[in-house]
Each structure stands twice: as structure tokens, then as C-alpha cells.
Image: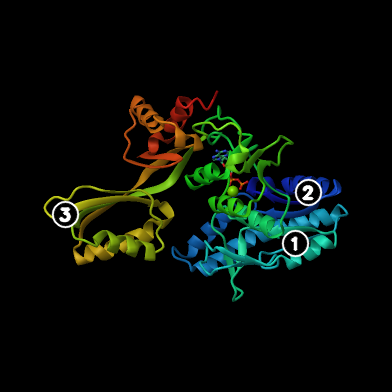
């Protein structure tokens, strides 16, 4: 079998843990498999590098940031290759560029455009273990890019897809995908399987156990994806097609996203095209918009509220300010003390009352819901951040996910 094994930050968090990873990779290889390993930076390392940059500038160039951030993954890839060679294997470390990962030039959140696996395939053919630095690629012009936070998951899935690997294993610090973040609700249960679509919703709605773009790509390329822990031999969670899953619970999981901010625009001119103008400007500034609420206009003025990731808030403010200058928005305010809690499940498609139960659960806990949005398989609510954990735990128990 050809297996891609990805080890996240905590799994390579110190030298002893890298040695532990080396033993695991070695065992996989000795069992007769071909192995490509993808590694993250040591845990905390990427954040530390970001802080270093902030010492000098609040607005460093994104290309400079990519040069800086991509270095964390190179450290772990090289160390792991050194450890494996010392164990008598023939291992080779590669950068994203070396592994043939070509991206667009949107620095710090580049998209993979193409993978040329020639070097990877050649090394595997020579019997080598390949260790790839995750989270990074290269533009056609040869500039280093990174793939967005958590992007080593994407590197692993993309390589598994390009090399037609039999399996892509994501090793992390929890033993699989749980009904909610086990750090918030210790009663959370590990799922043996989950569909790509539910996992994509959970990941997009804040469950950082897998980067959402990696799940999207795994679905598209039909990659067999397993999440498990590097700290024991416990079996993990298989992420697979919906039709492969026999038992479909109405609700599979609860996700929490603390990195959301609410933007409120007051006294917005009530004329045709204003929403288009505002949201086009926001889009051009690279701002990701999630929920939007517009109230009925009074005296030719309306209010519009929407949510954005905290990391996009500065760019959103710049866009809003330009409308304040023209007088088409009278006032604006920003609230970072909010969070978004969501329930996800494919079974919602065929069951009624799922959203009503979420709202009554919030009511019982006296938690005010600020905004609501739904899709076929999710219900999301924006609430005050101080109720985040209470909301997650009450929903978890209301849908009997602990049973
Ligand atoms: P890595 O560094 O290995 O990439 P991450 O920190 O990115 O690991 O992701 C693992 C973390 O995701 C877990 O420690 C856990 O707190 C969190 N998490 C959030 N939601 C879930 C969930 N539904 N199931 C499992 N883990 C979750
Ligand atoms: N090191 C990067 C991050 O912290 C990428 C990753 O770990 O997947 O976001
Ligand atoms: Mg991660």
C-alpha cells in the first residue's frame, strides 16, 4: 500500500515526539508499505513566528510572511528525515516546492493549482521514505506560499490525491473526530465514521481538527481519509462518502467558532444597489462574509449586520470606512465578543424540529441568540462569547450525543 501519514504540531512538538513519529513511520515502512510523510511545524512554532513579525510590523508583506512561516515545517521535515536515516532507512526531506506543489500567488492563503508528483514518485520507486514539509507550495514564478492555517492537512490530502495513495492518515492529539471538541465537552464520543459533507461543515464551522479545504479536496479526489492519534494505537475516524455510512444520526456533531466578529452598519442608504456596492467592496478587500441580516428600512435608512472572521476585521473596517466617508453609512460598530455555535447532521434533511430544539435549548439556558443561519445539514447561531462552552455542552446533551 502507498500511505500518506500527516503529523500535526503536537505530534512533532518536541524531539522525543519526533522520535516517536520516526518509530511509527519506520513500522509502517517495515510492514511493507510505501510511505510519504507530511509534517507540521512543532506546536506553537507558527504562532511564535507570527509574533516575531509583529514585533517589527502590524502589516508585514504577505510574501515575507510566507518566507517566514514556511520555515517551521522545514525544521520538522529535516529532523524527521535525519532521525529515519539514523534508524537505517533511506529518507529524504522535501519542501513544498521539491514535492511539486504549485499554488496561486495569494500569499498566506494560497490555493493549490497543480501537483507534479514526479520527484515524489521517483523517490518512492527508489525505496525511500519521503518527508514533505507541509503547509507550503510555490508559485509558478518560484515564490514560496503557505496554504492557510492548518494547511498541512491540505498538503497531505493533495499529495495523497496526486499519488493515488491507498490511504491518507492524519495524526493529531485526539483519537479521531468527536461529536464535539473533547476539550470542551469531555463526554464527547468518538465517531467511527463521518461523511465528507458533515466533516466539511464541522471544519468550516470551527472544528479545527481538520482544515476545511483539506476535506473539500478529499471529497473531490475521493481520498480515503482517517484521523487518529499519534500517542496510541487506538483506531481513528474514517471520513468517507455518505452512502458508505449505514447509520445516519440526525445530528452528528456540534462545532464552535470563537474567531468571529460582528459588524453592524447603521443608517445605510436605502437605495437599489447599495448592498451590492458594500459587499463587492468587502469582497475586493478579501473579506469573507458569513451571516447577513438586514432590517426593514425606516425613513430611507436601513441597518445591516454581518459576521466575518476576526482575521478579516481590519480589512472589513477599511471597506466600511470608505462608505462612511461618502455618507452612505451613518455609523458602524464592531463586536469581537461573539461566537458561532453550530449543529451539523445529514439526518436533518429528513427530520423536522431540529432547529426548534436548538432554539429551545438556548432559551432554557437563558442564552440570547443574535443571529441564525441554516443550510440543509446545519443550524448556526451567533451568541455572546461568554456562553460558548455552556451552549456547546447543552446542545450536546439536548441531542443526546453523549449517549
Ligand atoms: P494538529 O496540530 O495535529 O493539526 P489541531 O490542533 O489542528 O491539531 O486539531 C486538533 C484539535 O481539534 C483537538 O485537540 C481538539 O481540541 C480540536 N477539535 C475541535 N473539534 C473537534 C472534534 N469535533 N473532534 C476532535 N477534535 C476536535
Ligand atoms: N503550522 C501551520 C499552522 O499552525 C500549518 C499546520 O499546522 O497545519 O497553521
Ligand atoms: Mg491542524
Horizontal side of residue 266 vs 286, given as left or right: left
Residue lying at 21% horizontally and 55% vertically, measured from the top left: 331
The nearer-to-camera label among 3 and 1 is 3
Can the viewer see residue 171 in this picture? no
List x then y, in percent, for residue 207. 52, 43
Q: Are marks 1 and 2 in contact (CB under 8 Å)?
A: no
Mark 3 and mark 1: Cα distance apart in space: 60 Å
- Sequence order check: which comes first, mark 1 or mark 2? 2
Number of the label disc, if any, that sits on residue 25: 2
Return the residue nearer the eye: 102 or 98.
102
Residue lying at 43% horizontally and 30% vertically, measured from the top left: 390
List x then y, in percent, for residue 353. 39, 29
Mark 3 and mark 2: Cα distance apart in space: 62 Å
Crowd tier of the residue under label 3, counting other residues whose Cα lies within 10 Å: few below 14, some 14–19, many 20 or above: some
Q: Quadrant of the C terminus?
A: top right
CB of mark 3 near ligand 1 (< 8 Å): no
Crowd tier of the residue under label 2, counting other residues whose Cα lies within 10 Å: few below 14, some 14–19, many 20 or above: many
Residue occupied by mark 3: 301
- Sequence order check: which comes first, mark 3 or mark 1? 1
Can the viewer see residue 246 in this picture? yes
**Residue 164: quadrant of the picture:** bottom right
By what rule are the colours in the image chosen?
A: rainbow
Crowd tier of the residue under label 1, counting other residues whose Cα lies within 10 Å: few below 14, some 14–19, many 20 or above: many
Return the residue nearer the eye: 259 or 250.
250
Number of the label disc, if any, that sits on residue 93: 1
List x then y, in percent, for residue 211. 56, 50
Q: Secondary structure at mark 1?
A: strand
- Sequence order check: which comes first, mark 3 or mark 2? 2
Amino acid at each position: 500500500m502507498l500511505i500518506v501519514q500527516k503529523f500535526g504540531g503536537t505530534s512533532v512538538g518536541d524531539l522525543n515526539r519526533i522520535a516517536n513519529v520516526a518509530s511509527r513511520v519506520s513500522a509502517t515502512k517495515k510492514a511493507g508499505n510505501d510511505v510519504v510523510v507530511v509534517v507540521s511545524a512543532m506546536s506553537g512554532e507558527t504562532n511564535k513566528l507570527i509574533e516575531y513579525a509583529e514585533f517589527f510590523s502590524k502589516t508585514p508583506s504577505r510574501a515575507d510572511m510566507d518566507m517566514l512561516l514556511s520555515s517551521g515545517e522545514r525544521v520538522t521535515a529535516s529532523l524527521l528525515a535525519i532521525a529515519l536515516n539514523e534508524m537505517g532507512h533511506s529518507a529524504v526531506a522535501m519542501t513544498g516546492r521539491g514535492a511539486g506543489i504549485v499554488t496561486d500567488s495569494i500569499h498566506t492563503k494560497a490555493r493549490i493549482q497543480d501537483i507534479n508528483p514526479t520527484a515524489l514518485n521517483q523517490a518512492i520507486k527508489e525505496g525511500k521514505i519521503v518527508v514533505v514539509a507541509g503547509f507550503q507550495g510555490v508559485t509558478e514564478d518560484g515564490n514560496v506560499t503557505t496554504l492557510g492555517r492548518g494547511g498541512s492537512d491540505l498538503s497531505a490530502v493533495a499529495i495523497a490525491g496526486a499519488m493515488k495513495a491507498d490511504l491518507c492518515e492524519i495524526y493529531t492529539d485526539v483519537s479521531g473526530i468527536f461529536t464535539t471538541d473533547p476539550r470542551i465537552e469531555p463526554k464527547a464520543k468518538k465517531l467511527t465514521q463521518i461523511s465528507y459533507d458533515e466533516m466539511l461543515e464541522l471544519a468550516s464551522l470551527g472544528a479545527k481538527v481538520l482544515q476545511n479545504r483539506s476535506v473539500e479536496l478529499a471529497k473531490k479526489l475521493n481520498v480515503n481519509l482517517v484521523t487518529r492519534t499519534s500517542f496510541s494505537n487506538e483506531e481513528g475516524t474514517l471520513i468517507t462518502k455518505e452512502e458508505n455510512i449505514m447509520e445516519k444520526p440526525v445530528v452528528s456533531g456540534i462545532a464552535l467558532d470563537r474567531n468571529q466578529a460582528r459588524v453592524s452598519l447603521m443608517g445605510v442608504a436605502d437605495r437599489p444597489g447599495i448592498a451590492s456596492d458594500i459587499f463587492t467592496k468587502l469582497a475586493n478587500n478579501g473579506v469573507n462574509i458569513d451571516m447577513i441580516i438586514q432590517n426593514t428600512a425606516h425613513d430611507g435608512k436601513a441597518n445591516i449586520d454581518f459576521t466575518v472572521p476576526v482575521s478579516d476585521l481590519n480589512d472589513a473596517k477599511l471597506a466600511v470606512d470608505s462608505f462612511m466617508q461618502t455618507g452612505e453609512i451613518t455609523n458602524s460598530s464592531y463586536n469581537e465578543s461573539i461566537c458561532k455555535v453550530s449543529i451539523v447532521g445529514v439526518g436533518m434533511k429528513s427530520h423536522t424540529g431540529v432547529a426548534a430544539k436548538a432554539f429551545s435549548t438556548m432559551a432554557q439556558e437563558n442564552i440570547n441568540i443574535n443571529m441564525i443561519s441554516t443550510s440543509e445539514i446545519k443550524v448556526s447561531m451567533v451568541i455572546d462569547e461568554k456562553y460558548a462552552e455552556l451552549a456547546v455542552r447543552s446542545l450536546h446533551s439536548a441531542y443526546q450525543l453523549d449517549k
